[in-house]
Amino acid sequence: YTSVGNVLETTLTGLTLTQGSTVFVTVKAVNGAGLVSLATNGNGRIVDSVAPSTPVILDDGVFTTSNSALNFSWSSTDAVSGIDHYLVSLGTTAGGEDISPEAELSSDTIEVALTGLSLEEGTSYFLNVTAVDIAGNVSLLGSSDGITVDTIAPDLPEFLGVTPDFKSLSLAWDNPSNEDFFGVMLRRSTVATPTTRTEGDEALFVTGEDIVNTFFDQNLTAGERVFYSLFVRDIAGNW
């Protein structure tokens, strides 16, 4: 026991405490006659001086085709006292709060669906999350890697011509020159010109390095009319 004088609270320093252990304080009172009371024990405090892990944040990918909604999820761990709450903000830079200032969310909230936003074309958005454990330790700031708004489809392709043959034909076209051009779909119908990506049959669908600008259609029925439509998409998924 250590005498602390006639006080009702004190701070003990110079201790060597083990992370994760429970520490109890025992107090006895001594009166002027030297008589000592029975011991009273505290309810124990768990030693936790380590902050939660830096939150890891996920978004919907490199691009979003929405100008009003963003989705995020995150994870962080704390091995001793556990997560108490998160501090979350949204900005146009990692750590920024220019879109939404820091707000507190409960420990069981590990994802958000943000709607009603006014997102700008070509701008990247970052969610920032800090975890706070029950002991009050604060993690390092975690930020998503940024998701960029892209709501504009590529330019239309240009048909160059059709070369018919017996029960077959060849089609050629110029693909758009947009930097984010990523894929081509050719739809075919014997009823009418396909106006959507679900009408008729899929004759061709290629993306990335497999993109072509010609198509050879064979085993056609002699005398039957065939209608074709080309659809192109960018890397964000705009058609």
Image (cartoon, helix red, strand yellow):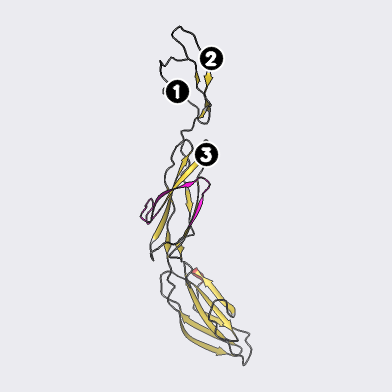
Q: CA distance from mark 1 to mark 3?
A: 24 Å
Which of the two marks, 1 or 2, is nearer to us in this view?
Answer: 2
In the rendering, at what x and y percent does residue 194 appear?
55, 82
- Position of residue 68 relative to residue 167, above or below, is above
The residue positioned 50% from the left and 11% from the top of the image is 36
View extreme (top): residue: 33
Residue 169 found in image quarter: bottom right
In the rendering, at what x and y percent does residue 170 appear?
54, 85
Which of the two marks, 1 or 3, is nearer to us in this view?
Answer: 3
Q: Is residue 106 magenta?
A: yes
Mark number displayed over residue 38: 2
Q: Is residue 110 magenta?
A: yes
In the rendering, at what x and y percent does residue 58 appear?
49, 54
Please name the residue that numbered disc 1 is placed on: 15
Q: Is the residue marked by circle 3 packed among few (<14), some (14-19), or many (20+) residues within 10 Å?
A: some
The residue positioned 51% from the left and 13% from the top of the image is 37
Q: Is the residue marked by circle 2 packed among few (<14), some (14-19), or many (20+) residues within 10 Å?
A: few
Please name the residue that numbered disc 3 is placed on: 82
| Left or right for 151, reference 223 | left
In depth, the one of 210 and 85 nearer the eye is 85
Q: Which span of residues is magenta-colored?
A: 90-113
Q: Amino acid at mark 3?
A: Gly
Q: Amino acid at mark 2?
A: Leu
Tell me which numbered mark, 1 or 2, is placed earlier along the sequence.
1
- Position of residue 123 relative to residue 38, above or below, is below
Tell me which numbered mark, 1 or 3, is placed earlier along the sequence.
1
